[in-house]
Image: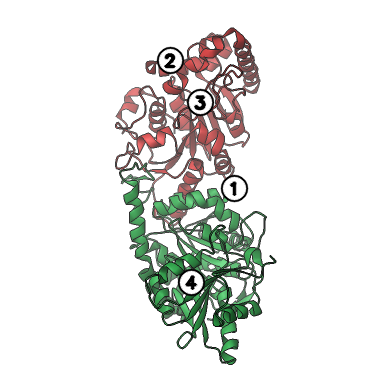
Amino acid sequence: MKKIAMNGDQAIALSWKQVDPDVVASYPITPQTIIVETFSEYVADGLVNTEYVCAESEHSAMSICIGASASGARTATATASAGLAFMWEVLYVASGMRLPIVMVVANRALSGPINIHCDHSDAMGARDSGWIQLFGENVQEAYDNSLMAFRVAEHMDIRMPMMTCLDGFIVTHSLERFEPLPDDVVKSFVGPFKYRHSLLDHKNPITMGPFDWTDYYFEHKYQQVEAMKRVTPVVNSVAKDFAKISGRDYQIIEPYKLEDADYAVLAMGSTAGTLKEMVDELRAEGKKVGSIKLRLFRPFPSAELAKMVEGLKGVAIMDRAVSIGAEGPIFPEARSALYDDKQRPRLINYVYGLGGRDIRPEELKHVFNQLIHNEGDTVNYLGVRK
Amino acid sequence: MSATTNLKVLSLRDDRYVEGHRLCAGCAEPIIARQVLMATDKPVVVSNATGCFEVSSSIYPFTSWNVPWIHSAFENAPATIAGVEAAYLALKRKGLIKDEMRFIAFGGDGASYDIGIQSLSGAIERGHHFLYVCLNNEAYMNTGIQRSGATSRGAQTTTCPAGTCVPGKKEFPKNLTKIIIAHDLPYAAQASPHNFKDLIEKSAKGLEANGPSFLNVIAPCPRGWRFDSAKTIEMSKLAVDTCIWPLYEFELGEWRLTADSKRIAEGSKKKLPISEWLKSQGRFSHLSNEKWAYVADEIQANVDKQWKELLRLCKT
């Protein structure tokens, strides 16, 4: 299909228009607002059949999604930053009830101080909530991830809520050319919504969200742990189906020029794109470097990462968030993934870009050079005035 | 639908909330819920806020619910039922659901007056078609009797105990029913389980209203209020007879006193002094101390003021 120019938020809204969810409940928050504004226009013009609910808060938006999804409706929402933080309590309710809600997160820093620009601390705060988390690099990926999310979350083997993340402003507000799919192709890719139980099936009444004592809570949590293990194959098979209709092939973790590389830098989101440019430049200088784009953060692809970095001498993990008192959130997971590998490369961490601080090409080049010269601390703060 | 309050008819309806729940002896909540659920023969979906009523009726793997039921969290029962209603509208429009259904949310006074007032206000403002029922036992009873925005002035709770310097709760409760009526919704009312006819009629009106509706129901709590668990209904009647809990409704812009309260206003029934109410419950026992006599006077003055204002609104 013809390429068109849209920003990331508009592309998400377009994906929703094509999917035409039964219920969308949301609350505006920068930098996600364009999604709900654009979708509102589709509703106002009768271009979708969705029951669209403008909630009075993100907590209610997610609560409405929970009620709708539990009633057998295909359900979507979007948020960012403080909005996701405000949802925190009910994120666990959605995943605990195994509701396949799809949510777009326009990654933005958390207050305080208040800041509207990109970092990943919002999504990282939800990493333990039982949601699948997929990150996109650019507008095309944001659109594609949004479509694939419905298939993944709703897959009968897992039934789990899923958030697809895109970098606030950098992707949400940047106009990019991308290739949407035709409406009918999206329709048949996503297919009709299926459910096992619905609150509206009054002839078979079900009690949802009951009270667990010490005798059952652990088992129900363990079921989520087990279900999360089944997610990666589903993400892969959905990506395979998506490649057939789009020609775009996605992996949960993607290598760039790693074959003969000695050093690599790993990042999530838009920085992964900048990294590829840097790899090309450094390769032109004769340096054996590559990069890694981490797309799936939950479940964390430990085995895939360990395999990918096998034989490398050094890897830098770029974290656009920080766990104050520890390190960036990806870093300990990556280290843990490599712990059993005797040949593991040196692994160092760069916390960068908090509150939308630009990550410049020369800074990334500096990271590569530190790796190459065996410099840098275990945890480094890049681009901050100390 | 005209609500039937004929006992023979009501007794033939399927029980929607059944035995096996673990609420305390003398709890008003199951009495109220069963009356509300009797008010329609249409299929219903229930959303329940965290609280006594929720934890006692859904201890996994058991349930007392014979109708589809969902509990999400403490403060979001209105948003949750709004989501159910949104799904219903969407799926009905697509022809995937044919039946006429009704939607009910239950929450305690903590869920309704305090932590969930935003969710409740938002759902009413958006016009979702549902009945919200506040089971008002005037404190956080599930967690062991802590004060709420519904707790009466002078009542002692574990977070506003009666000490040597402070006579229990210092503040009067907020008037949630009036706050809800300020949304200008199609139907809102106060009710009491001692008058099942009035409560069922109000429930039916709420369920058949063209939009959101609200019922605030007094739910005497033997544990929290400190009275004999055999006297729950007597206690709810006393609340009405002293006018601290008047029965009235707001229907399409009209205020109207109902049942016992209407009779008090018309003079055919006696308005009892608040001292009858205060001496009936252990939560007010400290007020018999001479030192706190003024608190009882202030409560009586406030009841009189509120009652007079209600008479004005009801044009009585």
Counting from the top left corner in percent of width and height, residue A378 is at 54, 69
Amino acid type, label 3:
Thr
| Residue drawn where x is 35% and y is 47% of the image | A217
- Colour used to depict chain B in the structure image: red
Q: Mark 1 points at which residue?
A: A56
Q: What element carries label 4?
A: loop
Q: Which colour scheme is used?
A: by chain
- Mark closest to the chain's N terminus, 4 or 1: 1
Residue density around tag 3, few if under 14, some if 14–19, many if 20 or more, within 10 Å: some
Mark 3 vs mark 1: tell me if same chain.
no
Counting from the top left corner in percent of width and height, residue B114 is at 56, 35
- The N terminus of chain B is located in which quarter? top left
Which of labels 4 and 3 is toward the front? Answer: 3
What separation in Å lies between label 2 and label 3 (alpha carbons)? 25 Å
Front residue of A141/B177: it is A141
| Residue drawn where x is 59% and y is 7% of the image | B290
Q: Is mark 3 on a helix, strand or loop?
A: loop
| Residue drawn where x is 44% and y is 45% of the image | B72
- Colour used to depict chain A in the structure image: green
Q: Mark 3 points at which residue?
A: B158
Q: Mark 4 points at which residue?
A: A295
Apparent side of residue B202 relative to residue B59 in the rendered image (left or right): right
- Mark closest to the chain's N terminus, 2 or 3: 3
Apparent side of residue A386 relative to residue A192 in the rendered image (left or right): right
Q: Is residue A93 above or below residue B174?
A: below
Q: What element carries label 2?
A: helix
Amino acid type, label 1:
Glu
Residue B109 visible from this viewpoint: yes
Q: Name the residue under label 2.
A: B234
